[in-house]
Amino acid sequence: MSADFSWIKPAPHGIYVEPADCWVDPSQAVDNALVTHGHADHARGGHGATIATPETLAIMKLRYRTGAEDENGEIPTKATPVAYGETIRLKGGVDATYIPAGHVLGSAQILLEHAGEKIIVTGDYKRRHDPTCPPFKVTKCDVLITEATFGLPVFTHPPISGEIAKITERLAAYPDACVLVGAYALGKAQRVIAELRAAGHMDPIYLHGAMEKMCRLYQEHGVDLGELRLVSDHSKDDMRGAVVVAPPSAMNDRWSRRLPDPITAMASGWMRVRQRARQRNVELPLIISDHADWTELTQTIRDVDPQESWITHGREEALLRWCQLNQRRARALAMVGREEEDE
């Protein structure tokens, strides 16, 4: 690493901000954590103190233990909410500003400013419209620390309207069946439901029990998901002609036997890879991702126009090569544990 930007130190388990003695998205418990969003490869419990958007803190409270337990087994309140656009002063003269990332509810890029230098950690992000969260905001900086989950030219996500139409068209063709959509419980499930509503599908949507609390949290934060019902409260006949949303792990589980002739669908950017759909026994692959595709990744680097791009995880080699071919300084950080299979 050059002498420039030496105050921020990437490590396999997180990004260390030395003057502030804090970590961005650490995969291990630390004293001070800045968290971009609530997915388990970026957020966890056990930190001494956590700084994140109010929505991310609510998600972390639901999914993880956001602070360290004291001797009485209680969790002290050491969570600091930061609204979009708000700047918080950290130790060592470091300012942190949380900026929309467009990934899931509460997701944020973190702009770190110190000694006249600006560094952005994107966390996970996408550039496409999502009715469940504010859109990604392009922000100029000196170093862009970006993901590259779908950092290969083959990954070009189609318009979501066409993927949602696959669901409604299949329901119309098979009115006595249901469409069982496998979707990640945080972000993907709620986006699929919200996009179905935007496409005019106003019938009740049925949920696996594991989806209920997160969907309720989204609704409490102003995301309209329409009428949701639990599968466990209804008969097979109730669910004929309906959409059912479940975690991917439940799709081929005994649980699915209670459904009426389910047509299996899977919402994931990885559905671009036909072999993955076959491995999952998916009849209806839905290429729906909450990550930037190749075009969005490269366009974001062009739009931000940083002095350097640091690539945290994903298909680092291809994006690194693209930067080199376009005379842009870049490096791969090879961070570990940063991908979730079903995103």
Image (tube, helix red, strand yellow):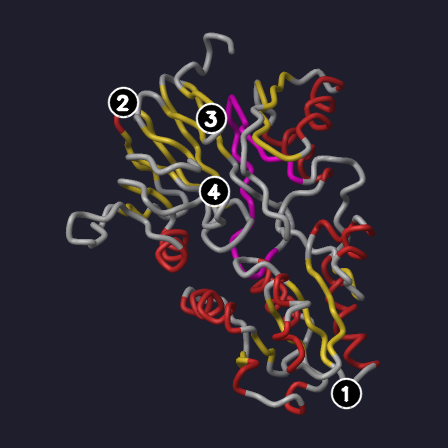
Residue at the disc numbered 3 = 119
311 is higher (above) or lower (below) than 218: above
- The label shown at residue 92 is 2
Decide whether the magenta segment is chiefly helix, strand or loop: loop
SS at mark 1 in the image: loop
Q: Earlier in the sequence, mark 2 or mark 3?
A: 2
Q: Is residue 45 left or right of residue 281?
A: left
Q: Amino acid at mark 1?
A: Asp
Q: Amino acid at mark 3?
A: Ile
Q: Circles 3 and 4: CB distance less than 8 Å? A: no
Q: Amino acid at mark 4?
A: His
Q: Circles 1 and 3: CB distance less than 8 Å? A: no
Q: 337 or 156: which is nearer to us? A: 337
Residue at the disc numbered 4 = 42
Q: Earlier in the sequence, mark 1 or mark 2?
A: 2
**Which tag is nearer the camera, tag 4 or tag 2?**
4
